[in-house]
Image (cartoon, rainbow, N blue to C red):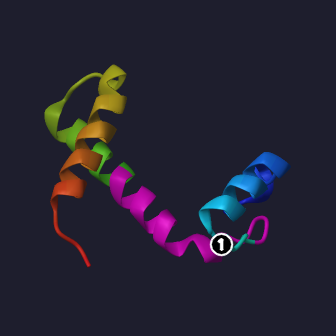
Amino acid sequence: MGQEWYNTAWEQYRKDQGLDFQFTMPYAYQQNGTAECTMRTILNGACSAMAESGMALKYWADAISTIVYVRNLIPSS
């Protein structure tokens, strides 16, 4: 989690809820491996869906939503 969300109100909420955050180093993409892989999978799926369907680029957001919906239906570890 980046430091952009760090402020006193958020800090109080975090303490009240018993949450513990571990901030990542700025520009350290190696620490975001899982998120990067998931985003790449979603974007590749949307690109493939758009190419196969031949639909206009204005439906890009719908393609992303569909890929995320299908991905959430598939069981994973």
Q: Give coordinates of residue 31: x percent, y percent.
A: 63, 76
Viewer-side residue, 49 vs 11: 11
Quarter residue 57 falls in: top left
Q: Indicate whether 1 appears above or below 61.
A: below
Quarter residue 20 falls in: bottom right
Viewer-side residue, 43 vs 68: 68
Residue drawn at x 69%, y 74% as measured from the top left: 22
Q: Give coordinates of residue 36: x percent, y percent.
A: 50, 64
Where does the magenta region start and end?
25-42
**Main secondary-structure element of the magenta-colored stretch:** helix
Q: Amino acid at mark 1?
A: Asp
Viewer-side residue, 2 vs 12: 12
Q: Residue furthest right?
A: 8
Q: Give coordinates of residue 29: x percent, y percent.
A: 65, 69
The N terminus appears in which quarter of the rendering?
Answer: bottom right
Q: Which residue, given by chain and number where applicable, does mark 1 sit on? A: 20
Quarter residue 60 falls in: top left
